[in-house]
Amino acid sequence: MILDPIFQRVDESIANATRGASRLAIVATLALLALGFATAAAHAYAMRTWGEISGNLVLAGAFLFAALIVYLATKDSVPPETQTRTAELEQSSFAQLPFVDQLFKPDGNLMRSIGSSIGSMAPVAAKAVAERVAPNLHLIIGAAVGLMIASKISEKLDSTKSPEA
């Protein structure tokens, strides 16, 4: 078939994107866990060093400062020509309101054609998702088991009585 090379390239692109996304999700999860433990350590240090109220205020100020730095660093990251094109697109989109109106009418032809195309694509999409999940199934199962074990450990630690109580 003539379209087979195109479909093969699309399939390879989806596979690469899925692999990259799963790696990024794992790295982001581990980085967030590390950030959480670093925050807990900083909180414990601040509480021990400056006391309960002052330690919490110092930590809150540090996070507020970090948020301000990130905001200022990313404030003008969009080039001005992109901003003007976006404004022009928003203004021109008001002229296309009949299209949007037809899209949201349940009896409109456009809505019916979109519904039928989605219905016919569902088996293909389900197959593609299953093919992408299969190579990473061990990671998904491992993450689920790890979360379940962490949940059980947390429940046990919460249910045990501490000597101070």
Image (cartoon, helix red, strand yellow):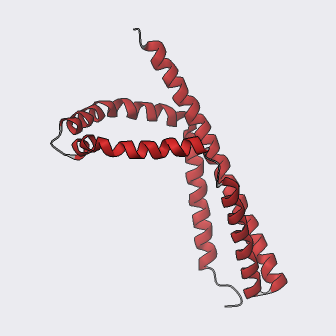
Can you give x and y, in whole percent of width and height, for residue 59 in the image? Answer: 74, 75
| Quadrant into which the N terminus falls | top left
User: Which residue is painted at 51% across and 37% down in the image?
Assistant: 133
Q: Is residue 100 left or right of residue 67?
A: left
Name above or below for residue 50 compared with residue 63: below
Picture coordinates of residue 53, whole percent (x, y) = 73, 87
111 or 2: nearer the viewer: 111
141 left or right of 95? Answer: right
Specify the quadrant of the image occupied by residue 49. bottom right
**Depth check: 4 or 133 in front?**
4
Residue 43 position in % (x across, y down): 75, 75
Residue 93 as seen in the image, left or right of residue 12? left
Name the residue at the top extreme. 1
Question: Height in image: 54 above or below 29?
Answer: below
Q: Residue furthest bottom?
A: 165
**Quadrant in which residue 38 is drawn:** bottom right
Residue 44, above or below 128: below
Percent of width and height locating residue 121: 33, 31
Q: Residue at x 58, y 65 (%)?
A: 151
User: Which residue reaches farthest right?
Assistant: 49
The number of numbered discs placed on residues in the rendered structure image is 0
Depth order, front residue of 97/18: 97
Q: Is residue 80 above or below residue 30?
A: above
Residue drawn at (71%, 90%) of the image: 164
Q: Quadrant of the C terminus?
A: bottom right
Residue 120 quadrant = top left
- Which residue is at 57% across, 41% downward? 81
